[in-house]
Every structure is written in structure tokens, then in C-alpha cells.
Amino acid sequence: MNLFAGLEEIVTENEPLAPYTWLKIGGPARYFVRPTCDDQLREVIKRCQENNYPWRIMGQGANLLIDDEGINCAVIKLDNDHFGHIDIDKQVVTVGAGMSLYNTIQSTIKAGLSGMEVLVGIPGTIGGAIKMNAGGRFGDIGTQTSRVEVIDVSGTTTWRERPELTFEYRHTNISEQIITRVELDLVEDDPQRVLNRMRETWILKKSTQPMSVNSAGCIFKNPSSEQPAGLMIDRLGFKGKSVGDAVVSEQHANFIINNNKATFQDFMRLIGQIKVAVYDRYGVELEMEVEVWQDDES
Ligand SMILES: Cc1cc2nc3c(=O)[nH]c(=O)nc-3n(C[C@H](O)[C@H](O)[C@H](O)COP(=O)(O)OP(=O)(O)OC[C@H]3O[C@@H](n4cnc5c(N)ncnc54)[C@H](O)[C@@H]3O)c2cc1C
């Protein structure tokens, strides 16, 4: 393992990725890297860049569909405690990119801060949530975010700040590949009131989305709020339709579930069928919300 010589403690080779994803799908990553500090993270990026070796960063894999054949790159995961700190100073919360959204929500509510409870039920890390601008009907993480610490490919750490830092529907203009820390600007509120709001949001989410099965959340972005992808897919009769063990959820047509042993190809075929049917009926090209990780076939 010359590429990561001296870093063997944090690198495993040919690590299957399925266990690290919510879909439980995905073959091995050539290298799986779990840095324990910023310097190590920079060193890993430096080695990859110098050797022109591809790399990706993974949160909790809640928005990923990974090829069963595996991927020939270094997958970096920030799950060391170093990336999971939270610091609360009045209404300003600084949180590591590896911290889970769940723990962030719990900590901020306990501290009497409101804002993050709207994200209850969304699995993943703070880093993944920022990258995707995760959110739902009551708001998104971008709205609560004042600045984001990033590391660029040269290893330089900077803070991206507003107003230059922007968020849109499932998108941010952060172009650097690594998010390490996030500063949230929340609002002081009574913890019990925030908790009640969180519970209401959770009950609503659970009643409309399949939360206790293996999925990656919504497969497609909504083309518009008047034309949600799930409604179009539902109207085309896709609920319950399957390819292999990949099944369109009966509860929410924009969710595809891994019923047991679904493969990457099962998912890709079903996704392809849905896209063609939606285009034929509505003239709409559905855009993926879930990120597909596979090697370039060219
Ligand atoms: C049951 C279920 C319900 C869901 N409901 C919602 C919902 O209501 N709203 C919603 O928006 N999403 C939802 N999702 C999707 C998912 O939870 C979000 O997209 C989440 O933000 C993904 O976070 P993650 O840490 O798992 O990121 P991953 O899936 O691991 O990665 C997603 C993207 O973020 C990048 N990334 C991860 N960490 C970093 C980092 N530190 N720096 C830079 N880039 C990084 C990855 O490279 C990738 O591009 C749902 C998923 C499931 C399984």
C-alpha cells in the first residue's frame, strides 16, 4: 500500500461499503480511510492529489447508491471523535462534520435552541447534510448555517461565509470537497416547546415516509413543489413495482426500498424504468437526489 505508506493504522484495503450505507448495497472501496485528525486528513488528500488517485468522502451513506462491483478509489470517512465535537456558545453552535444530525438535534434542544428540530428523522452527518442541504417541509440546514469550514484539494482550510455561501433546494455552492466544521446560528427557545415541535415533525415524517426499512430517502429531486416526483411516480402506478428485491415503496413512491438482497443493478433498472415512464407521460426529466457511486466505465 505505497499510496498510504505510514498511514496503515487508518487505512483498510478492499473494504465492503454496503454496511456503511443505509441501502446496504455497495461493493468494496479500494481504500477506506478514517483519519483521526485534520493533519491526517490533509495528508490523505495530499497523497491522493500527488498520485492523481481519485477519492470521495462519505458521511453515513444515507444518500448513496454504490455499485456492487466496488469503486476504485479512496473513500474517506470522518467518523473519528475528532470530527464529532459540538460546542455551544449562546445561540452559536459549532459542530464537527462527522457528528450525526440526530445527536446535533438532541444537543441543541437540550441547550434550549430551536432550528435543528425541523430536520428530525433525516439520517446522516452534519457534513452530508450541508453538502445536500438536507431538509424537508419545515426547513433545511442551510437556513440555520452561518459558515462552513472546508479543506480544499491543496489542503488549505478556510471558512466559507455568508453572503457568498449560498444554499438552494438540495444544493450548496460549496465547491471544496471536504467540509470539516459547521457553524449554526440558532434561536433561543423553551426546550419543551422545541421538543414538542420535533415530535410533531417526526410523527408526520413517519406517517408519510418509510423510515424503518433500507432506503436512501427520496431517489429523485422534486422538479417543483407543484410537481413532486413522488406524485408523478405514484400516478404512473409504480407503488409496489419491483426489479429483483428493489421495490417502490407503497408508502411514498419516491422511495425505493431494498427488500432484502437488492443489487445495484436492480436499483438502476427500476430507476431507469421510472425515468422513462415519467418522461413519456409528463415530459419531465427526473434528476437524481441520491448520489450514484460507480467507476467510470469509459
Ligand atoms: C430514511 C431516509 C429518509 C431521508 N429523508 C430525507 C429528508 O427528509 N430530507 C433530505 O434532505 N434527505 C433525506 N434523506 C437523505 C439523507 O439522509 C441526506 O441526504 C443526508 O444529508 C445524507 O447525509 P450522509 O452523512 O449520510 O451523507 P452521505 O450519503 O454519506 O453523502 C452524501 C453526499 O455528501 C457528501 N459528504 C458527506 N460528508 C461530507 C463532508 N464531510 N464533506 C463534504 N462532503 C461530504 C458525500 O460525498 C456525498 O456527496 C433521507 C435518507 C433516508 C435513508
Image (cartoon, rainbow, N blue to C red):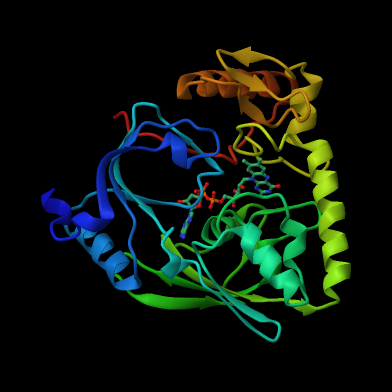
Left or right of 92 in this view: 235: right
Q: Is residue 164 visible?
A: no
Q: Is residue 245 visible?
A: yes
Picture layout, residue 30 above or below residue 144: above
User: Farthest left residue?
Assistant: 2
Left or right of 207 in this view: 4: left
Residue depicted at 84% across the width and 55% down the height: 199
| Image quadrant where residue 210 sits | top right
| Image quadrant where residue 177 sits | bottom left
Question: Which residue is more in the foreground, 261 or 162?
Answer: 261
Residue depicted at 17% across the width and 55% down the height: 4
User: Farthest bottom residue?
Assistant: 90
Residue depicted at 51% across the width and 23% down the height: 268
User: Picture coordinates of residue 205 (x, y %)?
Assistant: 79, 44
| The C terminus: image quadrant | top left
Left or right of 10 in this view: 196: right
Left or right of 126 in this view: 122: right
Residue depicted at 42% across the width and 32% down the height: 26
User: Picture coordinates of residue 94 (x, y %)?
Assistant: 57, 77
Picture layout, residue 247 above or below residue 177: above
User: Picture coordinates of residue 156 (x, y %)?
Assistant: 33, 75
User: Picture coordinates of residue 239 (x, y %)?
Assistant: 75, 19
Q: Give the number of marks.
A: 0
